[in-house]
Image (spheres, grey):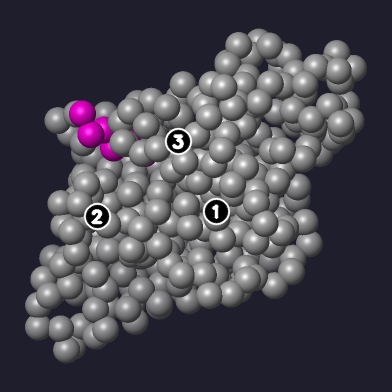
Amino acid sequence: PRMQCFSKEMYEDIRVDLEDISNRISNRGDRGHFIGGIVRLAAHDFMDFDRNAVDQLGSDGCLDFSHSVNAGLSDLWCDDPIACPFKALYDDKYSSISRADFWVAAANAVIKNASPNRQLDLPFLWGRTDTDNCPNSSNRIPEPTGCDDNEAVFISRMGLTWTDAVALLGAHTLGRGDANFSGHAGTWVQDDRESTIFDKQYFQEVVNRGWRQRQTNVADNNWTWGGNNRGVMMLNTDICLRFDIDDLSPCCTNIGQDCRDNSVQGIQCRDSSSVRPEAFQAFNRFLSGGGNDNDAFFAAFSSAWVKATTNGHDSLIGLVDSCESSSSPTQSMVPTSSRLNVPSMIPTLSHKPTQIST
């Protein structure tokens, strides 16, 4: 049986335990891959929500790990305690809570740990129940072909806004793609060190670099900058938020930089202001302020994350100070889903992060 109480102490214990596991991963690229994988796991669990379907799904602890769209996640969630310390942590210490709650709590934890000065403390509500069979889940996860995929998933099915979508995709600042899993290899940010930090670097990278297509006129394409051996990439679903690449014609996102391809050096990609004005404006807003000012991005991400992780749940429960003194978890009942007052849950950012190199 699942536990009937989730305390603030347990929530903090999850954060500390995951920080300990992360810190034992000495290679920064592997560490970024680990924490990015936890966020990806929680995101794939909520991105299958469809408000128009009979089986709405959403955050329910259910994914088809054998499906190609979830490739690589089985390296995170497997029954080998040595190979999968994240799953072992759940089995050994936190299996009294649902997988769905644990995945969201864990993603919140690694995001907080990776944000400068642990500044981003995401809201958390619990009470999700697990589903063991979700045959329609994998077909709802977006393919990385362009903003039609973003619109279908985030706007049409999940009921979010373009601002929400842009904020959520900012989580690509963590971790890396793997050619063996997705066919797309590299970090979204400039190096492995940056891939362990949760900040607005993703947005800065999209705008400041001269991104070019690795292949042209290909739907499932990715973008790169710099020399051939530089391990960086963006997907069409990233670039399309800030640039109009819908026709897949060759272009460079910033011809003021060396695009490393003479065929596109003089072809500036059009911005997305006419085709996706809200996404364009959100992107620019998240870039605002100094290089270490993440406030706009963090506030929007918090709002979007709460909507995404509570979609489909009529009522979830707030953390209690102590399970021993809590006579009933319903005392902390908080309305969610369409009735959730999201702005009230956005954390107050009381201080600016310390300087980090960009």
Question: Is 328 situated above or below 22?
Answer: below
Query: What amino acid type should be assigned to the residue bearing mark 2?
Result: Leu
Residue visible at 23% across and 39% down?
57
Closest to the observer: 115 or 273? 273
In the rendered structure, the answer to whether residue 133 lies left or right of residue 300 reads left
- Comes first in the chain, label 1 or label 2: 1
Q: Which residues are magenta?
A: 47-52
Residue visible at 18% across and 88% down?
324
Q: Work out whether residue 169 can be spotted.
A: no
**Residue 47 appears at what percent x and percent y?**
36, 39
Closest to the observer: 9 or 93? 9
Query: What amino acid type should be assigned to the residue bearing mark 3?
Result: Trp
In the rendered structure, the answer to whether residue 222 lies left or right of residue 17 reads right
- Comes first in the chain, label 3 or label 1: 3
The residue that disc 3 covers is 162
Question: Is 170 situated above or below 236?
Answer: below
Tag 3, which secondary structure?
Answer: helix
Q: Which mark is residue 340?
A: 2
